[in-house]
Amino acid sequence: MAVPADDTAPIPRTAAFDSSLGFLRDGYTFGSRRFQRLGRDVFATRIMLKPVICMRGPEAARIFYDGDRFTRQGAMPASVRHLLQDDGSVQGLDGAAHRHRKALFMALLTDAAAIDRLVSLFADEWRSALPRWQAAGQIVLADELPALLTRAGAAWAGVPVGADQRDDRAAELEAMVANAGRVGPSNWWARWRRRRTERWAERALARLPDRGAAPTSPAARLADHHDLDGRGLPPAIAAVELINLLRPIVAVERYIVFAALALHEHQPWRARFAAGDEADLLPFVQEVRRFYPFFPAVAGRVRQAFDWQGTRFPVGQWVLLDIHGTNHHPAVWAAPDSFRPERFRDWDEDPYRMVPQGAGHAAETHRCPGERATIALVMAAMRLLTREMDWRLPPQDLSVRLNRMPARPASGLAMTGITGLPPV
């Protein structure tokens, strides 16, 4: 029988002086392996020779997200920050300044009518692509989705991209997501391409047709936003924030591919949805978000010193909250490594247990404001995959390598036998 951990004892340390190689080797399971080995939901180590405390679980998520204990400033390597946030963005703000600008993103990304419009644009793009997919004989779903999501997201935001730019914008936004967890030439290339996207975004905002006293589109509202000091956003920062609207929409491609993989691997669920039974559609999507790897962890630096788990967290301490480990915590989730949508039938929506896109309440914390839009887009893709088209997966490598971040099936999910179906 396991001996309960003494949470008042000092935080244990890994045997390794530096865990950088272990992090690269283990990827998403880096934290879970060491939490299990050490018998605690918190441990100290070094990554890139820098002292760091890693933690997981609902209590850790509450400590990390609630209040103003942590700042995101200086918490992520430049190779990640430049691709996923960049300097001056809402993610790098703290306190009242963060909450004020975050309110704009909340307004844009939680409004039901706005989400419905985004979903409708995405579904239209999917339906437009379906004849081409049928004619092609085989597609790779992961390669097709970024363009669809880019076009839908840009049209929704009010900055539609021309036919001559669509492929470039989609490739640039996808590269930001795909290379954020890498180092070396691929990351440098993606960061160089991001500068092209920023220049495009700045030009697009400068020539918006509906800027003025009552801007209507998300892009126009962003361009005319004023921070707490009463000043508008500098054009370069507004461009960064526009990318922070579009890039996460493109990142939903990962969840959609995983949802398709889950439908393939759990055929009874696919048959149920194909018949029009949507009773468990939302639980299925939530389980996709819990089960499959998306963000491995979120980083912060202590802004206000505090004591927890028998240890003082001084100002400046680097901390990693293990997102994947929290979503697979064996004390929180029954059979965490099994795909069980039914676990979400009576879900209490605890914002600290289910944390694929952050914890806490989005309006008050750094939790992703686009979570509702993400769920809506994946649900729409599920309907399209099960009720408006038929498809099969030929033999291919469907393995999900947990030491590759961000992860997705190795093959990208090649589909054949695509045919259109009349909507149920």
Image: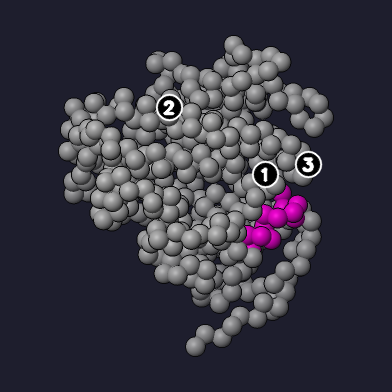
Q: Looking at the picture, does residue 297 appear above or below residue 138?
A: below
Q: Amino acid at mark 2?
A: Leu
Mark sitting on residue 96: 3
Q: Amino acid at mark 1?
A: Ala
Span of residues in magenta: 60-72
Q: Which residue is mark 2?
A: 121
Give left or right: position of 237 versus 144. Answer: right
Q: Which residue is mark 1?
A: 363
Which structural element holds mark 1?
loop
Measured in 3D between alpha carbons, the distance from the residue under mark 2 to the one under mark 3, in whole angstroms, is 34 Å
Q: Nearer the viewer, residue 421 or 215?
A: 421
Q: Residue at x 69, y 37 (%)?
A: 103
Q: Nearer the viewer, residue 205 or 85?
A: 205
Which structural element holds mark 3?
helix
Q: Looking at the picture, does residue 74 appear above or below residue 333?
A: above
From this viewpoint, is residue 191 visible? no
Q: Nearer the viewer, residue 346 or 48?
A: 346
Give left or right: position of 134 versus 216. Answer: left
Give left or right: position of 10 versus 291. Answer: right
Q: Residue at x 59, y 74 (%)?
A: 40
Q: Is residue 71 magenta?
A: yes
